[in-house]
Amino acid sequence: MPQTPSTMIPLGTPMPPFSLPDPVGQAWSASEGRTGTLVIFICNHCPFVIHVAATLQKIAEQCDASDIEMVCINSNDQEAYPADSAEKMIETKKEFSWTFPYIMDESQEVAIAFNATCTPDIFLFDAKKKLFYRGQFDDSRPGSGESVGSDLLRAMKDLVDGNAPPDGQKPSIGCNIKWKA
């Protein structure tokens, strides 16, 4: 499996505005007045995403408790990769009992605006929609043991507690986003 790192855009980068539909056509856009917004680029078939799939719901529950809005985006080319189709997104969300929005970026414009490169690619923004954390869930990788999301959870706690962004943020590693030709 190819390993692609996230680009680690500068902290403080503004969150690109966007509105995207979920697989049944319901539009999603970021709310105002929240403590933060967590945007994660994922897909259905990537081994790195499958490795953290159960952790995603635990992260969502912590987001709810911390007033952080969470959304996951599938930007992969669904025609070339049918495992990432809207129908499969619905199945994946049901399989893992995800309660957070899982939306589609069919044009791939949102992934480009975020400079997303891999799945999972994680972006945590503060209340002013400025980038606070980008990088990995934790040091675990497929086959190396359970993911608990320790790096992301620490960043979320720092955000909620009003601390500075954590030092030593490490890039996420995952499959590359499947770009359209």
Image: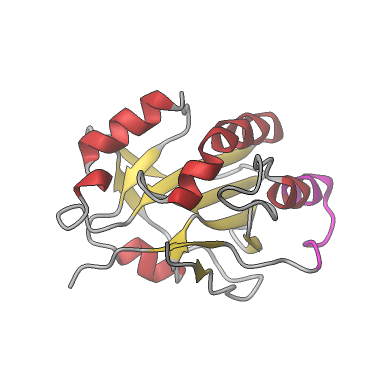
Up-down relation of residue 4 to residue 154 (above or below): below
Across and down, in percent, residue 114 comes to: 45, 67
Quadrant including the N terminus? bottom left
- The answer, for residue 31, to whether it is visible in the render is no
Q: Is residue 117 left or right of residue 137?
A: left
Q: Quadrant of residue 101?
A: top left
- Residue 39's x, y, as percent? 51, 51
Q: Is residue 117 left or right of residue 83?
A: right
Q: Is residue 61 left or right of residue 53?
A: right
User: Which span of residues is magenta-colored?
Assistant: 156-167
Work out whether residue 83 can be spotted. yes
Q: Position of residue 47 (x, y in %)?
A: 45, 49
Q: Residue at x 57, y 58 (%)?
A: 123
Question: Which residue is at a point 55% across and 33% down the rendered structure image?
Answer: 54
Drawn side of residue 157 relative to residue 82, left or right: right
Does the stretch in magenta take in 140? Answer: no
